[in-house]
Amino acid sequence: MTNKPSVYFDYAATTPCDASVLKAMEPYWNECFGNPHSRSHAYGWDAESAVERARTQVAWAINAQSDEVIFTSGATEANNLAIKGFVLGPNMPKNKKKILTFATEHKCVIESFRFLKSMGFEVKILPVLSNGLVDLDMLENELDDAAFLSIMYINNETGVVQDIGAISKMCRAKGVCLHVDAAQAVGKIPVNARDVDLLSISGHKLYGPKGIGALFVSKSPRVRIASLFSGGGQERGMRSGTLPTVLCVGLGAAVELTLERMKEDFERAQHFQQQVIDQVINKLPEVYINGAIDSKIPHILNISVPYVEGESLIMRMHEFALSSGSACTSKSLEPSHVIRAMHPDNEDLAHSSLRVCFGRQTKAEDVDALIRALQKHIEELRSLSPLWSMVQKGIDLKTINWQAH
């Protein structure tokens, strides 16, 4: 095993599986190993009972009925199933080809829309405001001739929370199917599936196991989705394949636990976020928060430090597990597509972004150490930056005619 950073601040990428969740899962590795789809003996009955109990736990958490919960391998599959399944399914309006999403969505959503564009659908990837929120007036106009909208409840890079209630009312009024990626929302804020048509969940974002997620599919007659898999017709015919009993149990236990801990986790994250704001953002010059501070969760804090490369800052702070954006795009050296979409005229903010995520295991002394490290390394890196030196001298960088030699 490689040497791990001593302090973890990347909880939006993944969370450790809670000890109580692991305990709930333990019997289903060997003792209760039956196939939940085997209906002719007790091994199968026991496994099926465990799966259905987990399904009920997930449904209860989002105000759904248990038979509206479809288990998947995670939020990426749930998003693909929701988007492609509806648009290619029987209830996609024949007279409408326009489908909508936003430039700040997860890559699996944007790539799903690109796939559908190649099939002839009219795809529109809409911009967001500089604070990461949706322009509701613009959206209402775009919905006039649209059939489908996919939007993230809470952005995984900035923590910005969209007004799903208002968006739902507009979609219902115009007959538009609404899919919400709630991978970062469940367990952090109250989520009501009755406001939407389709909703995605991920287990490993809420202290459950990796490899399991769920898709809420409303039983409304206007919501029907086509399966992406051929097989035995499990999960109401929408997702064939043998369900992993042990992972389903883990997701159910994790969802139940995270709702019990939601208020406590929120308040702790709020306290830690405020410390970083007070000691870093408010004390150092030109350090900015990405996203509307009054419309975001405290668990995710994304900052930009102009004249400092985000990756350089992360490399200096090697004792902390941090990121500059989504884990799914961390292999790329491209700057965050989310921050670029929020600030299309200032790409430097994307290159200089850093994401700090607070979680259940975060300690006060960890945050104190992080603050000291941020203060130290931001000042050191800026002292090495000729651009920062020029700005300090009052030079407007926009007036300089940069020429290659």
Image (spheres, helix red, strand yellow):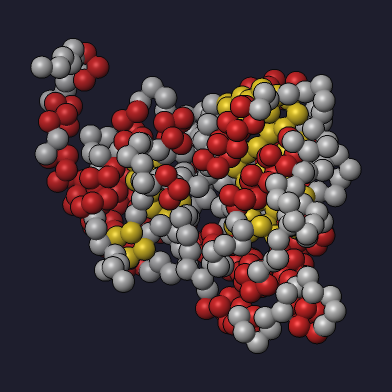
Q: Quadrant of the N terminus?
A: bottom left
x 58%, y 49%: residue = 76
Question: Based on the displayed image, in which of its 4 quarters is residue 248 positioned?
Answer: bottom right
Residue most extreme to the right: 221
Q: Quadrant of the C terminus?
A: top left
Whole-percent x, y for residue 326 in the image: 44, 47
Question: Based on the displayed image, in which of its 4 quarters is residue 210 positioned?
Answer: bottom right
Which of these two is toward me, 206 or 371? 206
338 left or right of 334? right
x 74%, y 36%: residue = 88
Answer whether residue 239 is visible to the viewer in this image.
yes
x 35%, y 36%: residue = 334
Residue most extreme to the front: 231
Which of these two is toward me, 363 or 85? 85
Answer whether residue 64 is visible to the viewer in this image.
no
342 left or right of 29? left
Whole-percent x, y for residue 177 in the image: 76, 36
Which of these two is toward me, 105 or 358? 105
Q: How many marks?
A: 0
349 up-or-down from 263: above or below: above
x 75%, y 61%: residue = 59
Which of these two is toward me, 254 or 119? 119
Whole-percent x, y for residue 262 in the image: 59, 64
Residue most extreme to the bottom: 31
330 up-or-down from 351: above or below: below
250 up-or-down from 159: above or below: below
